[in-house]
Image (cartoon, rainbow, N blue to C red):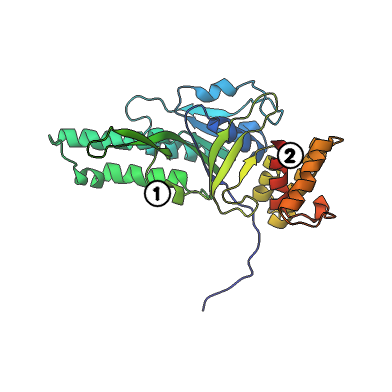
Amino acid sequence: MSKFRSIERKQSKLSCAIMGISGSGKSGLALLIATNLASSPDKVYAADTENGALDLFEGITMSDGKVMSGVQVTDLAEDYGSTAPINYIAARNDAVAEGGEVFVADSITHGWQWLLDRVSAINEEAHTTSKNVSAWNKPEIIENKNVLRNQIYRSSDIHNIVTIRQKEKIAIIQEEGQKAEVTKLGEQPIMMDDCKFEPDLVLTMVSAGTPEGKPPIARVDKTRYAMLRLGQEYEFTPELVKQFADYLNEGVSPEVLLERQKNDIITSIKDMVGKDKLKAMKIKMFKNTNKLDEKMTLDEMTIDQLRNLYNLIYE
C-alpha cells in the first residue's frame, strides 16, 4: 500500500536562471545571491565562460555592502570542446566533491552555442547544406543536450544558478508595394526554446546594482517559490536577499517572509515620505484612486497595495 505523510516546509536547493543582455548585471546578481546563500564566499564555485569576467568582481564592493572575495572559479574558455555542456556538469560535480554550497554557471549560453556549432560541423562532415535532423540524434549531441538541461535544472546536492544571455529579436516585414519595416519582437534568450520549463526561478534583469548601494532589479518570469511573485519586479536589497536565503536554507514559512517584506516596504515608504507634504499627499491620492478607506494605515494594506504605493511615491 502507498505510504502518505504530512506536507512540510523543508530546506530547498535553489534552481535559478538569470537572463539578460550582455552587460545587464546577470553575473553580479548571480554572485550576490550565491554569496548570501553560502556559509562563506569560498563555498561558492563558478564556471566562467566569459574570459575571466568573474575575476573583475574580486575586491569590488557589492550592492549589499560586502566586498567580493574568495569565490572559486574554473575557466571554460572559447576554444573547441571546453564549453561543451558535459564540462559544466563536470565542474559542478567537482564543486560538490570539494564541499561547495552554491554553483554558478556563467553563462550556459556558451554551452548551447557549442551544441549548435557541433551540429553544424556534423552537417558539414556529411557534405550537405540541408538541415540534417539526424545530427541531433547523434549520441554525442543527445548526451550534451541532456546534460545542458540537467545543468539548468535543480541539483539535490548544491544550490544551482545559471546565467543566460538574451538578444533583441527582430522581424523584417514587407507588404507588397510597401517599404520593408523592422519590427522589434523583444528580448529572447539565446538558449533552447523550452529552457524556462527547467529552473524553479527565472529572473530577467531590469537594471544592475552598483557599489554605491543601488540594488539590482529583476523581474520574476517564473517562480515556484511562494515569497517571490510572478511578474513582480524586485529590488534585490540586502534584506530581500537575506530573506530569500532564509527561505531556502532554513525552511522559513513563506507567510513569515512575506510579513518581513511587508514591514520592509512600510519602513521604506515612511523613510521616503518623512515630512515631505507632497509625498504624503500621494498616499492620500493612492487611497482615493484605489477606493480605500482614508483612515486605513500602512499596516492594514496588502503587500501588493504597498508595492504599488511605494512605486507611486518613488516616481
Q: Position of residue 188 (x, y in %)?
A: 42, 39
Using residue 291 as the reference point, say whether residue 179 is left or right of it.
left
Q: Residue at x 19, y 37 (%)?
A: 123
Q: Position of residue 39 (x, y in %)?
A: 67, 38
Q: Position of residue 61 (x, y in %)?
A: 67, 24
Q: Which residue reaches farthest front? A: 177
Q: Picture quarter containing residue 176? A: top left
Using residue 11 as the reference point, say whether residue 54 is left or right of it.
left
Of residue 228 and residue 68, the one placed in the foreground of this image is: 228
Does any portion of residue 117 appear in the rendered image? yes
Count of numbered labels shown in the rendering:
2
Q: Secondary structure at mark 1?
A: loop
Q: Residue at x 22, y 36 (%)?
A: 177
Q: Identify the residue under disc 2.
A: 313
- Alpha carbon separation for disc pair 1 and 2: 38 Å
Of residue 100 and residue 125, the one placed in the foreground of this image is: 125
Q: Is residue 12 above or below residue 118?
A: below
Q: Is residue 12 above or below residue 57?
A: below
Mark 2 residue type = Ile
Q: Identify the residue under disc 1.
A: 194
- Return the disc, 1 or 2, that comes first in the chain's sequence: 1
Q: Are marks 1 and 2 in contact (CB under 8 Å)?
A: no
Mark 1 residue type = Asp
Q: Secondary structure at mark 2?
A: helix
Q: Which residue reaches farthest bottom? A: 1
